[in-house]
Image (cartoon, rainbow, N blue to C red):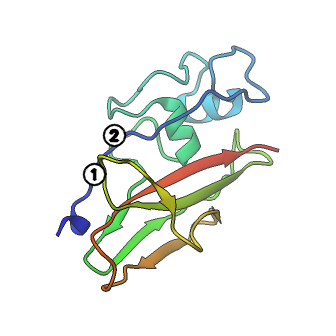
Amino acid sequence: MLRNQQAQTPLQVTTATFLGDTDSDGLPDAWEQNVFGNLSHDGNTDSDGDGLSNLAKYIAGTNPNSAASHFRLDISQTAISFTTVKAEGAGYEGCSRHYGLETCPDLVAGKWSAVPGYEDIVGTNQVVTYTISTASPQQFYRARVRLQQP
């Protein structure tokens, strides 16, 4: 079964405007200073070469200086789990990070739908586990991460 195979799809990011982005590079200055020590990086750059932009790493709450730091789903035959990250620290003032789990029976058709009860999970550094029904047909799963600004 394909349920236990993990697909690595880069996090899709839409353009956002942040308060405190004096250099207009798509990243909050406070976060940029905290993780890079300067304001010379931008949201479109992939500083660690892992295929995800600095903006995607900011939204996901992962380290843009480490290719090993990334959001992932752990998928087995019976469950899907992931760890949420609370939006806190420099550049996240007043923000909250939200997660959603989606499913699709056919990747070609691409009709993704929210998994009931897993549409809007606020990240508080908790592990979220979804038990896969053994009675359901083959499904594909993905997660969405968004950052809600004040």
Asked whether residue 85 appears in the rendered view, the answer is no
Residue under numbered circle 2: 67
User: In the image, what residue occupies the spot 50% across and 73% down?
Assistant: 128
> Which of the two discs, 1 and 2, labels the residue nearer the N terminus?
1
Whole-percent x, y for residue 50 in the image: 32, 35
For the point 58% across and 42% down, the residue is 59
Foreground of the two, 50 or 78? 78
Q: Judge left or right: residue 43 versus residue 46.
A: right
Q: Where residue 135 sits: x, y (%)?
A: 32, 85
Expressed as whole percent of the image width and height from the top left, the position of residue 67 reads 34, 40
Residue under the point 50% across and 30% down: 54
Q: Residue 81, can we see it? A: yes
Q: How many marks are shown on the rendered structure?
A: 2
Q: Mark 1 or 2, which is nearer the eye?
A: 1
Q: Is residue 44 left or right of residue 147?
A: left
Q: Amino acid at mark 2?
A: Ala
Which secondary structure, mark 1?
loop
Helix, strand or loop status at disc 2: loop
Q: What is the crowding at mark 2: few (fewer than 14 residues within 10 Å), some, or many (at least 20)? A: some
**Image quadrant containing the C terminus:** top right
What crowding class fits label 1: few (fewer than 14 Cα within 10 Å), some (14-19), or many (20 or more)? Answer: few
Q: CA distance from mark 1 to mark 2?
A: 17 Å
User: Outermost residue toward the left?
Assistant: 1
Residue drawn at x 80%, y 48% as measured from the top left: 94
Q: Is residue 67 above or below residue 123?
A: above
Describe residue 148's horizontal placement relative to residue 113 as left or right: right
Q: Which residue is mark 1?
A: 7
Amino acid carrying mark 1 in the image: Ala
